[in-house]
Amino acid sequence: MATDPLGTQFWPRVDGSRILVVPVGSIEQHGPHLPLDTDTRIADAVAHTIPDALVGPAIAYGASGEHEGFPGTVSIGTAALEAVLVEYGRSACRWSDRVVFVNGHGGNGPAVRSAVLLLRYEGRDVVWFPCAVPGADAHAGRTETSMLLHVSPEVVDMTKAEVGNVTDIASLLPALRGGGLAPITANGVLGDPTGADSEEGRRVFEQLCTRAADAVQRWSPSEHGVIS
């Protein structure tokens, strides 16, 4: 069965036994070539491929404080995002048996994890799935750019794609946590998007969607409430 968008449904047609999938993204800089809602677009696209589910409208604002050195970024912070997700889960679980938060932004992780753990402690069957790609560059690089060239090619401007800071992310974490991205990458990119390719993006995206669908089907959350 195809996935249905919750926003287009009438309440009598919403079956309480179905799975509700909720994309969680961010509004943050993604270099000079990708839009501010890149993470939201990817999470939403993944969510819409999960079979036999309702997909809620995306929660588009996230915890993106590390990007606030760049215009356009709007972060509501970890505490606010956690509160939104908790109240969302409490409300949705009044009629939906299961809820999956599909997270598209790594900085949302602490908020999503804490919210899901609280909801599960309260007896609600809520989990989360991270849109993480093994081996990907960190931010607005080849991987994200390739995926967006597949998902939303009309919003990608490859004429403005530039190499950013290509240092291994593990080495950058202390500086990133201390002062955000602006001091370590003038253009907001961590990686090299110049070789991005839509066909590569299709392969990566389809692998991610397969993982998401399989994880939802297995429904075996870890101690942190994550399915993978």
Image: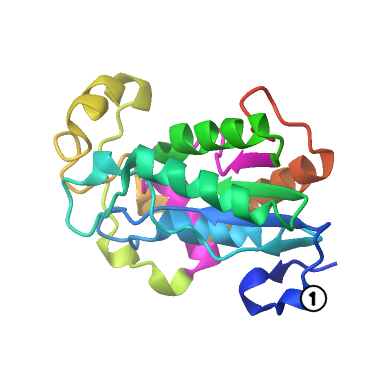
Q: Is residue 7 visible?
A: yes
The range drawn in magenta is 126-152
Vertical side of 223 occupied by 130: above or below: below
Instruction: Point out residue 58 in the picture as x, y percentages from the top left corner.
Output: 52, 61
Vertical side of 103 occupied by 43: above or below: below
Q: Amino acid at mark 1?
A: Arg
- Which residue: 71% across, 43% down? 211
- Which residue: 72% across, 31% down? 221
3 within the magenta span: no
Q: Which residue is mark 1?
A: 13
Task: State which quarter of the image contains the C terminus.
Answer: top right
Instruction: Point out residue 147 in the picture as x, y percentages from the top left corner.
Output: 52, 56
Instruction: Point out residue 170 in the picture as x, y percentages from the top left corner.
Output: 36, 21
- Which residue: 66% across, 70% down? 6
Instruction: Point out residue 29 in the picture as x, y percentages from the top left corner.
Output: 28, 53
Q: Is residue 137 visible?
A: no
User: Element at badge 1?
Assistant: helix
Task: State which quarter of the image contains the N terminus.
Answer: bottom right
Q: Residues within 10 Å of mark 1 (few under 14, many from 20)?
A: few
Left or right for 174, reference 95? left
Left or right for 114, reference 13? left
